[in-house]
Amino acid sequence: MSTEQTSSAVGTTHSDESVTLLIQQRVRKDAIARYEQWLRVIAARAAEYPGHQGVHIIRPPEGGNEYSIIIRFASFADAERWTKSTDRQQLLVEIADAFEREDQYQIQPGIEFWFTPPSPAQKRPEPWKQWLITTSVIWPLTMLIPPLFKPVFTAIPLLGHWGISHGIIASTIVALVVFLIMPRYVHAVSRWLFH
């Protein structure tokens, strides 16, 4: 694999609305420990850039090696400033030999990376449909997941501390939404969603 790392942006839009930068990286299993250290460095560096609104790292299940990094920026210009920055390019070069494939990213308005039409002939869903689908997934999870973790937080008080417990619950909900529920849900309602 080449040590020169290149990235490509697809589905970009020059909207002034808040955007989501979705980065996907497939890491060699023997390089995951080094990658995890590097990930902390690049996440901290990205947070220094204008318009950065938060980051969520979706780690692979045990035995997996596909990472998804979701970063919110205030605008497309802010996201593009980071993706094209010298800082990011230099950091990618440092870790390039740890990847199984080239770094890939998409910049999408809002949460639309879940709602890309399966074919060019289909139109992008209306914003109200995206809101309805997303709310109908997250709402029940916010009621179901916290009680499930209550025995864990009772048994291990450290995990129940304010902030830590919220992080565990949030990461669980996001993982369920991204990996398990949303792809199947969107597929099940695609005839209604994309028309």
Image: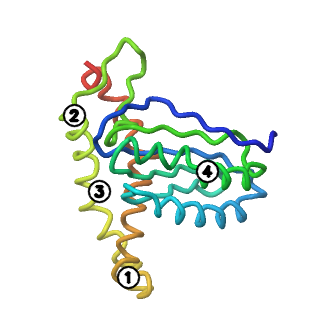
| Name of the residue lying farthest toward the bottom | 157
Foreground of the two, 96 or 24: 96
- Kind of residue indicated by mark 4: Thr
Which residue shows up at 37% across the image and 11% down it? 121
Which residue shows up at 40% across the image and 70% down it? 167
Alpha carbon separation for disc pair 4 and 3: 39 Å
Q: Where is residue 22 in the image (x, y as percent from the top left)?
A: 48, 44
Q: In this view, does 170 lie above or below 86?
A: below
Alpha carbon separation for disc pair 4 and 1: 40 Å
Q: Residues within 10 Å of mark 4 (few under 14, many from 20)?
A: few
- Kind of residue indicated by mark 1: Gly
Question: Mark on residue 185?
Answer: none
Task: Report the residue marked by disc 2.
Answer: 127
Task: Report the residue marked by disc 4.
Answer: 86
- Mark 3 vs mark 2: in front: 2
Q: Earlier in the sequence, mark 4 or mark 1?
A: 4
Q: Earlier in the sequence, mark 1 or mark 2?
A: 2
Location of the C terminus by quadrant is top left
- Mark 1 vs mark 2: in front: 2
Task: Report the residue marked by disc 1.
Answer: 160
Q: Where is residue 37 in the image (x, y as percent from the top left)?
A: 66, 67
Foreground of the two, 108 or 84: 84
- Tag 4–tag 1 contact (CB < 8 Å): no
